[in-house]
Amino acid sequence: MYENNIDLEKKLRTEFATLMAGLKSNYPNWQFDLQDKNMMLFWYESLMDIPMQVLTAAVHKLISQEEFYPNIAKIRKAASEIINGEPVDETEAWGLVKKAIRNFGYARAEEAYASLPVEVVQAIQAMGGWLEICSSENDEADRAHFYRTMKSINKRQELDNVVSIGLKNQISLLQKPKEPIAYIPNETRYERASDESINRGLEKVRSILASLGTGA
């Protein structure tokens, strides 16, 4: 990734090194050696897929909220929340579901879904769908089931977001746009022949076969 240690040192002494120094100053008991190039390199490579502006905001967010120094996972989680927004907790989500039921009833499922966050819709669908949740008569059991489902969805989404902050961008750069079905490698493109042209071709083939004494 770097040609030599000088390039690495220059990189680490810029924005990332400054950010780490600020983090260290806020947690003086943190056993992090700013002069340890291996340690700095490990942290840099573990966080380098996060845009520096987002990473800086994540660190400042943690400094304002956390009494104890954060690890890499906490920094990635904070960055993910900045990029993707904080997840809807299960209590708030259930309140949104009940409000949607009151506003749209069981017959306007599409409108109800459109009014809800994607994760909440996923939870409803996991429980059997809009009609199922509207027609149920056991509100207490539904709420408990919904809470468990929302927690599972939020946890899965959180892990996906934390791991793939920059990975999705890297994948998109590697993926080629879908080529047209009729794509030809040499960039020559052909259109489907008309029925009239096809019939003329068949007649010509039959004429050739007839001249050779072969029936078509």
Image: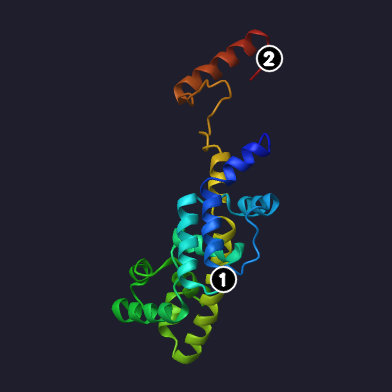
Q: Which residue is mark 1?
A: 155
Ranked by sequence position, the earlier of labels 1 and 2 is 1
- Numbered circle sitting on residue 142: none
Q: Which residue is mark 2?
A: 214
Residue 206 percent location from the top left of the image: 59, 16
Viewer-side label of 1, 2: 1
Location of residue 46 (image quadrant):
bottom right
Residue situated in front as seen by the camera: 98 or 2: 2
Q: Residue at x 53, y 61 (%)?
A: 23
The reply to whether residue 35 is visible in this rendering is yes
Residue situated in front as seen by the camera: 24 or 189: 24
The local crowd at label 1, few if under 14, some if 14 to 19, many if 20 or more residues have their Cα within 10 Å, is few
Q: Residue at x 52, y 34 (%)?
A: 179
Q: Residue at x 48, y 23 (%)?
A: 193
Give the quadrant of the C terminus: top right
- Inspect the image, locate mark 1, and give the three-letter code of the amino acid beneath it: Lys
Q: Is residue 25 above or below residue 98?
A: above
Side (left or right) of 58 relative to 44: left
Q: Residue at x 45, y 24 (%)?
A: 194
